[in-house]
Image (spheres, grey):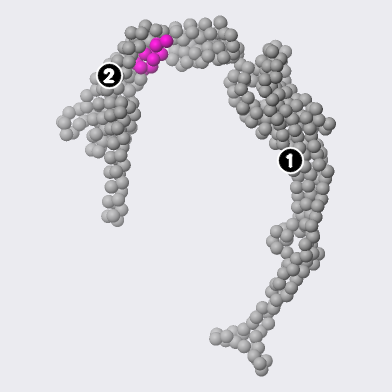
Amino acid sequence: MKKIILFLAITVLVYSCSGVKKTQEALNSGNYLNAINTSILRLTENKTKKSNQEYILMLEEAFQKNSERELNHIKFLEKDDNEATYEGIYKGYVNLKNIQERIKPLLPLKLIEEARDAEFVFNDYDEDIIDYKADLSEYLYDHAEHLLTNATSKLDYQKAYNDFVYLNEINPGFEDSKEKMEQALQKGIYFVKVEMINNSQQIIPARLSESLLNFNTYGLDNQWIKYHTNHLSNIAYDYGMKLSIENILISPEQISDRQIIKEKEIVDGYEYVKDRRGNTVVDSLGNKMKIEIFKTVRCDFREFNQNKATRIDGLAIFTDMVSNQQIDSYPLSTEFIFEHFYGQADGDERALDDNEKQLIRVQALPFPTNEQMVYDAGEQLKANIKDIIYRQRF
C-alpha cells in the first residue's frame, strides 16, 4: 500500500513539474496567451495549492508582457490611420479586456514566499472598444455594401454576406445590415438545374428516378449551392447537372451447381473389451472397458448457386448555363449482384461438414425481377453521385 501511495505521489509530482516546465517554456518563447490560459486553468482548480505558486508568478509575468505587447501593436496600427486596421485594433482591445475579466475572479492571488499579492494592472478598455466597434461597423457596412452594389460575381456577394454576418456578430442590428445580409445571401447562391436522361434501351423504374433525383436524401449541406430537380421559372440557373444513363445491362438468371461425394469415418457405437477367454476387461476402478466402433458413411452433396447481375453506366455532365458550355464530366458506374446458395443431399448427412449441413436447410429463392435489380443497382449509384457532387467546384 505504501508503495502505491509513493508511486501516485511521484506521478503527480512529475505531472505537475511537466506542466510548470511547459508553461515556463511558453512564457520564455513569447507565447504569452498559452502561459496565461494554462495558469488560469491551474489556479481555477485550486489557487491556494502550494504547488500552484509558480503558476501565480507566471500568470503575473505573462499578463504584464502580453498587455505591453498588445498595446504596442495597437499603437502601431493606430499610427497607420487605415480603416483596414480597425478590426485588428478592436479585437486587440477585446482580447485585453477578456483576459482581465478571467483573472479578476481569482484575485487575490497570494505569493507566500514573497509575502505579497500578485500585481495586475487593469485598464478600462470599454471606451476604446465602443469607439472602434463603431468605426469597424461603419467600415464593414460600407465595404459590404460596396461589394453588394458593385458585385461582378457570386463570390463578391458571398464576401459581402460574410462581412454583414461578422458585423451583426459584433454590432447586432446595425442600420439595415440584416436586410442587406439576406440580399447578399440570395444573390450569392449558385443554382444548379438537375435533370436525368435515359439513353439506355431499358426502362428505368419510376421509383428509381424519384430516388436519384431526391437530393434531400444526399445529405448535402452547402449554403451557396442549391440543386433543383423541380425547376422554377423565376430562377436564372447558373449551372446544369445532367445525369445521363447510358447503359443498363442485366444478365440472364443462372443456376450453376456442383456435385461432391462426401465420405467420413464416424463413431457408430461401442463394444466392450474382452480378453482371450471372452471375459469383459475392467479398468483399475472396476469399470468395464469399451472401445469405439467406426463406420464409413457416404452422402452425395449438390451445391446450387443462383446468380443474376445488373450494371448501370452513365455520365454526370455539368454545364455553364450562361455560356452553354460543358465544364465537367464524370463517369457513373455501379453493379448489383444477386447471389444465393442452397444445397441438396442424398445419403447419410453425417458425412457433411457444418456449412454443407446449413446449405441443405436453405431453399431456392425466386429471382428478383429486372425492375428490382435495376432499382437496387440505382440505389448504389446514389453514393457515386453524392461523391461527384462533393468533388464538383463551380
* Res 66 quadrant in image: top left
Tag 1 or tag 2, which sits nearer the N-term?
2
Q: Is residue 91 magenta?
A: yes
Q: 124 or 12, which is in the foreground?
A: 12
Q: Amino acid at mark 1?
A: Phe
Please rate how many residues cluster around mark 1, counting C-alpha atoms within 10 Å: few if below 14, some from 14 to 19, many from 20: many
167 or 188: which is nearer to us?
188
Tell whether position 166 is magenta: no
State the image quarter where residue 200 is shown: top right
Q: Secondary structure at mark 1?
A: strand
Instruction: Identify the residue at image location x=66%, y=33%.
Output: 383
Q: Which residue is mark 1?
A: 336
- The answer to whether 197 appears left or right of 76 in the picture is right
Q: Residue at x 44, y 12 (%)?
A: 171
Magenta region:
84-94
Q: Quadrant of the N terminus?
A: bottom left
Residue 391 in view (yes/no): yes
Residue 331 in picture, x, y percent from top left? 70, 30
x, y percent for residue 52: 26, 36
- Residue at 32% from the left image edge and 18% from the top image edge: 70
* SS under mark 2: helix
Q: In which quarter of the view is residue 353 placed?
A: bottom right
Where residue 22 appears, as percent x and y from the top left, is 31, 35
Q: Which residue is mark 2?
A: 68
**Dominant secondary structure (helix, strand or loop) of the stretch shown in magenta:** helix
- Percent x, y for residue 212? 72, 29
138 in relation to 209, above or below: above
Amino acid under disc 2: Glu
